[in-house]
Amino acid sequence: MNHAAIVAAASTALAAPATGPVALRLSDVVVDYPGAACVILRCASVAPSARVPPSVVVKRWNTPGGHVRHEWAALEFLGGVPAAQALVPRLYGGDAEAELLVLEDLGDPAEQLLGNLLTGDDPQRAEAALVAFNAALGRLHGATVGRAEEHRRIRDRRGAHARSRHAIHRLDEALGALPGLMTGTGARVSRALEREVQAAAAAIRAPGPFLALTHGDATPGNAFYADGRVRLFDLETASFRHALLDGAFARLRYLYSVWARRVPDAVQRRTLEAYRRELVRGCPAAADDPSFAHALLACSAGWLAALCAHLPSVTDEDKRFGRSTWRQRIVAGLDHFVALAADLGAFTALADGCTDMAHRLRLRWPTGDCALPSYEAFTEGGPSPAGRPNGW
């Protein structure tokens, strides 16, 4: 579907019997490149109204797969949750058959995208954005605890049933394979380690009081930051699952992203504190230190397993993914898990295995393959010409 056809379909989707037709015209192509999952267009309303503002964004998926229905259901649900409404773009309309949604225009990615701030030269703003981003995730989760049935009804009405191919849906499988991958590097796998891996998988499968609507793909490429405020977008992977699968972003989940670079330890801790403060408002279980530690480490173990699942593909030669390589991410993930387990005093057997595995990988791989660079905003000397991931 070309741009003109997308704009025409979006105009039709906004039309309503009570208010008549709506005319949009293309004002800017935000995203459209070979291999892009979506085309994103900024469109002007020819006759703005209370229902259709002067500028909207039209998001059209290039391949079918139910993504439009998932995002539609998530945004419709969150539009009815007062504490979460302001965290996501307003939904004006859509056409599931045409694979498109018409959304609130959140602004300029070049100036507001979290990933772009991390590659800039202002460490204070980058840190403030990360803290606000994690606080927003905590607010999202806390506001939606106990509301799974509401979301299910909307999801069923929108026909949002298919799972995406995102790694978040394969963490069980990845955890099951983790001990074998560790053994394959020569690392020692104890029975205690295997029990902790099983406990992590069980916690992810049965979140208990931590069941909340999660973004699912909470990364620096899916959030804007401006005037101290964070807006989350691209919610096609959103679903009710363990809140800490998003909440682990602060310490480990961020490594499974096209934008992955190293974050200073002190900034990681501050962002996690911001997340937990907001989560506790709607999830009292998060105030209990042992419960929170177990939940965070279980979900972090899931993301670590997802990183390590790429180990067989980089045994002989490293591969780049976005802003860093898989070898860099794997070693950093092992180090991060060890540090987190030490901070929280739990999952010590898995942490011991991670220490051994990281040591063996460092002996096997060149130093550069094991050193994850820092985000430019946190690097003395400022940004490098490395560029940003394709699409923004």
Image (tube, rainbow, N blue to C red):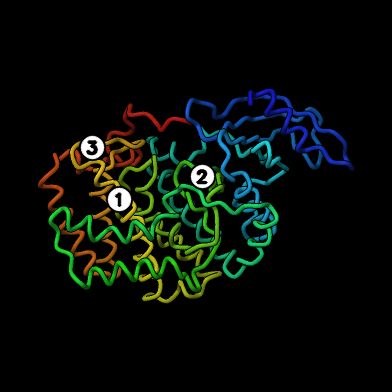
Foreground mark, 1 or 2, reads 1
Residue 347 relative to residue 242: left or right: left
The amino acid type found where label 2 is placed reads: Ala
Q: CA distance from mark 3 to mark 2?
A: 29 Å
Estimate the spatial distance between the alpha carbons at disc 1 and disc 2, rounded to whole Å: 26 Å
Q: Who's the residue at 13% across and 53% down the image?
A: 359
Amino acid type, callout 1: Ala
Label 3: element kind = loop
The residue depicted at 47 percent of the width and 50 percent of the height is 218
Say which mark, if any, is on residue 309: 1
**Mark 3 neighbour class, 10 Å CA radius: few under 14, some 14 to 19, many 20 or more:** some
Pointer 3 residue? 318
Above or below 11: residue 182? below
Q: Which residue is mark 2?
A: 223
Residue 311 coordinates in the image, percent (x, y): 25, 47
3 or 2: tag closer to the N-terminus: 2
Observer able to see residue 262? yes
Q: Position of residue 240 (x, y in %)?
A: 54, 61
Rendered position, 179 above or below 321: below
Residue 251 seen in the figure: no
Looking at the rendered structure, the kind of residue marked 3 is Asp
User: Which numbered disc flags the more N-terminal residue, 3 or 1?
Assistant: 1
Using the image, determine if residue 345 lies above or below residue 51.
below
Q: Residue at x 50, y 48 (%)?
A: 164
Number of callouts? 3
- Circle 2 Cα neighbour tier, 10 Å, few/some/many (<14 / 14–19 / ≥20): many
The span from disc 3 to disc 1 (Cα, nearest Å) is 14 Å
Nearest-to-viewer mark from 3 and 1: 1
Question: Residue 238 versus residue 25: which sits nearer the camera?
Answer: 238
Left or right? Give the position of 30 relative to 7: left
Residue 363 spot, x, y in % from top left:
10, 47
